[in-house]
Amino acid sequence: MRKHIITSPIALLSLLYSQALFANEQLSDNTPRLTALSHANLMLAPGNMLKDATLLIENNKIKAVIKDNDIPDGAFEIDLSGHTIYSGFIDPFTEYAIDYEREIQDKSGPVYEIKRIGGNASNGAIHSEMQWFNYVYPDKEQAKKWVDNGFTSVQSSYLDGIFRGQGVTLSLANKKANDVIYNAHTSQFMAFNKGSSVQDYPQSLMGSMALIRQTLSDANWYNQNKNKSSGETVEFNIAFERLADAKKQSFIFETKNLNNQLRAAQLLNQHELSGSLIGNGREYARLTELKSYPFSLVLPLNYPAAPEIIDGDSEREVSLAQLRHWERAPSNLAKVADAEIPFALTQYGIESDKFWPRLKLAVERGLSEEAALAALTTDAAEISGIDHLAGKLEPGFMADLVISDGNIFDDGKIVSIWLQGEERQLINRNRALLDKPYQLQLNELAFDLNISQSPSLSGTLSSGENTIELANLDYQQGRLTFSADLSEAGFKGVSRFTLWLDDQGLTGRLLDSSNQTIPFGGIKLKPVTIESKQDKPTQTALISKLTSPNVAYGLNERPALDKVHIKNATIWTSDKSGVLSNSDLIIARGKIEEIGQNLKTPSGYASIDATGKHVTAGIIDEHSHIALNGGTNEGTDAITSEVRIGDVINPDDIAIYRGLAGGVTTAQILHGSANPIGGQAQIIQLKWGDNAEQLKFEDAPASIKFALGENVKQSNWGDDYTRRFPQSRIGVKSLFSEAFNEALAYRKAHSDYKKMRSSERRRTVAPQYNYRLEAIAEVLEQTRNIHIHSYVQSEILMFLRLAEAYNFKVSTFTHILEGYKVADEMAEHGAHASTFSDWWAYKFEVYDAIPQNTCLMQNKGVLTSINSDDYEMQRRLNQEAAKSMMYCGMAAEDAWKMITINPAIQLGIEDKVGSLVEGKQADIVLWDHQPLSVYAKVDSTWISGRRYFSREQDRTAQTEVATERAALIQKVLRSDDAHKQGETPIELTEPEWHCDTHFNAWQQSAKGAL
């Protein structure tokens, strides 16, 4: 049978479907169609190019790859000489074609419980039961923003909630849903943002993480126990049902920032789940951490807009971190690829017309074309669950294709897209030739020909400084005609040109004014660039530093373990040795090796002459709220003991660096005081430059925040907050009793189940693991310490008696401004006190506070410390401790112990830190004056023998920061408009928390940004 050679895709489609134009549109055309795309460069897979070959398509799939262009009989051939065929691109993170709108419950005041319909979950942010293939309704116009960029399929979900449901991967073809669904059951979509749920819980980031943890645990329990044959039945829960095989499913997790991306990775990894993380463009800053997790990434090209710098005031508002990210964001993809972390690309979050310019910029900044193509095809196909039928040019794969007239990552353009074997032209292939520059040769003269198609056909011929405007332009079926006055070039009058263009060049003839025909030829020119890459160092060379954290004063590398001999210092041991004059201290391997006088410097140790200086143990803050992301309160319930401050530690917080500058080495980060039983606390060490996990104090005892007083009964929350129990002080006591009783019953149920015979356990529904009750049970078992927010003597006494009734000891009453009234009772119980130096009268329940509180409690035998509960005060805790010397004559050594060994005892870490004793951790501070003096400044701060702060280093850093800022600002001012465009990033400023910060301040400042 004769082959049909078609050079125009339009002609092909016309031929294929001319008879069908008059047919009934409801009838399907099942006639086999065989199409040969010949003489093309086939990108079979990233890095695997086959030149001058044929791709054979049968109906909607690839039938064969033909190397020698031997076209089968009966095939319609389209000659694609000079063109490249790629597998269609895939976007793994979209909301395309989901025809669904969630019903939103009315909200007037707090919502503690949702309307439960159809056996769903008890929390309005959990939608794991949703299977989004049920709601697919293709939309040609909506699809266009992907198709125009070369995408042929997408993975899609309704992007709302924490557990969002199971995604679907579908073709962008304009067909009914049944024909476009490639994989109906892809990844479970997740996020930290609860979305449209009107239910108050969760309100904080740590609340979202706790809800995820409990949901996965409940789903596992549900699916292990739902079919047991005991008399007890398990309620039907479709949300848990759909998470039955979570470890076999894939999850795709949306996060808004780098810290949350790492939190999601850790959370999924802890539950042995697999999947992908939606990126944020800052991956370059923590690649080592990201690579340690087994997750691929889906990365948006959300480059930030250049900071707007108009004058000195606007310049001062721009942080160094913003400037660094503006410069480095286009290099992010290259850095991720270099780290060998698999990733795909998404258009999510940007306008579609920005996609290719930004991707080409990423290639310019070091991303290999092979890695870029893998991110659009093979890696994207795997993440989207369709790597068995898309992502490569391979027999049996879908005929989803991208055809370009050149290198798509350079100057090439996409001319057409094939969706399931049907072509959608973006640019007429022949007309695309008009966009190229040519040079034609007339006699001895060479003319550059440039044609513009927008808004209408126009063009010029130029030779040297002479430019001739073209008139009467027309282009039909590969033939370009126009007229031009070439009299100045030696031709008579106006000449008429006829040209034929192809990928190699042009041929043509002109008819001059004397009707003489003159043939000529020409060549296609390479694109002319105004500047070569070598001429644009300001766009490609990076000025900014990459530090940890990647903000001002971040470190280039982790401090080394010091071997140091500090000589001739006054040493405040915070131990029975007291204050030692003219003494030496030697540290090595992170420990204090020796303390004494006139010690010999060991070989290889640095020596510091500390004559006139003072050495102390690092300051310890029992009560702090620094270094947090996403809120310090989960105040939506009276009991939230399941939430963990340790989930939301922020290693980028400049308060860590400032704390070091004030001699602070350790802090307990506490939940706020919005509820009687708050969240689990986290003790950290201020290891500036380390990651969130490295900040956590290793093997520190577990602790939790409880609270009494005005805050927990919602006294000052407003008229809407009058329904949550408790609303009174006696209600608070009742709630504690109820919680303790429930925890005891919970623990007994688990104990009884474990005592059963294995055969009986197989038939019996197991008790659920409850993270909330687990933490309370640990309090009763004295494996988790209580630090309780308190003010008024009556409430302090109430809780002491309650603890004694349940046979556990209260570790520390914090704030406790009326502690002097009940010091005898506290001492008898063995409770500690952590208080303010002289805060009073800032609300009704602290009217009786007095600055002699510390002395009065300490004199009664209550171990007392001073805490900050404030970002600014933390770096002045030495002065806060000194105030007791003024107010009530406390001895200097006792005052100093209130911020060193005393809080160490309260936190249960006194065996490691808090005093200068041989063998303890080398947490030490070198001061230039007596440390309780208002004139004292920190010279150096070591944690575990690493110097995380030094005054000399800080002075150098200030100069370096100023220099780097100035250089980056100049780069912004010099950059062209193309490099200034981008999205305005969400710059979240964490509220500076203390216990009486209103619980929903974070919600108001960062709504929707989790």
Image (tube, helix red, strand yellow):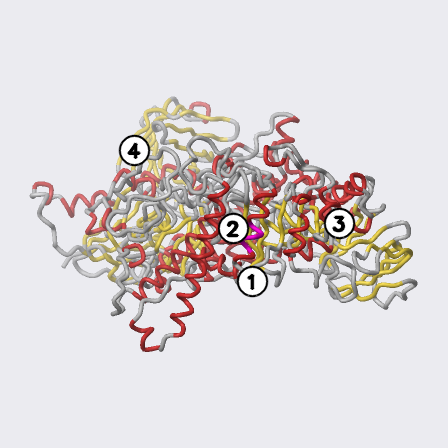
Give the numbered dot on residue 259: none
- Quarter containing the N terminus: bottom left
- In screen coordinates, is 722 left or right of 498? right
In the figure, 442 relative to 900: above or below?
above
Q: Nearer the viewer, mark 2 or mark 3?
A: 3
Residue at horizontal 31%, vertical 62%? 388
Mark sitting earlier along the chain (1/4): 4
Q: What is the three-letter code of the residue carrying label 2?
A: Gly
Residue matched to label 4: 475
Residue at horizontal 51%, vertical 33%? 716
| Element type at mark 3 | helix
Mark sitting earlier along the chain (4/2): 4
Q: What is the three-letter code of the residue carrying label 4?
A: Tyr
Q: CA distance from mark 4 to mark 2?
A: 73 Å
Look at the image and give the residue range highlighted in magenta. 799-803
Residue matched to label 3: 859
Q: Is residue 417 magenta?
A: no
Residue matched to label 1: 783
Q: Residue furthest top?
A: 493
In the figure, 30 relative to 26: above or below?
below
| Residue 887 visible within the image | yes
Query: Secondary structure of the magenta portion, mostly?
Result: helix
| Element type at mark 2 | strand
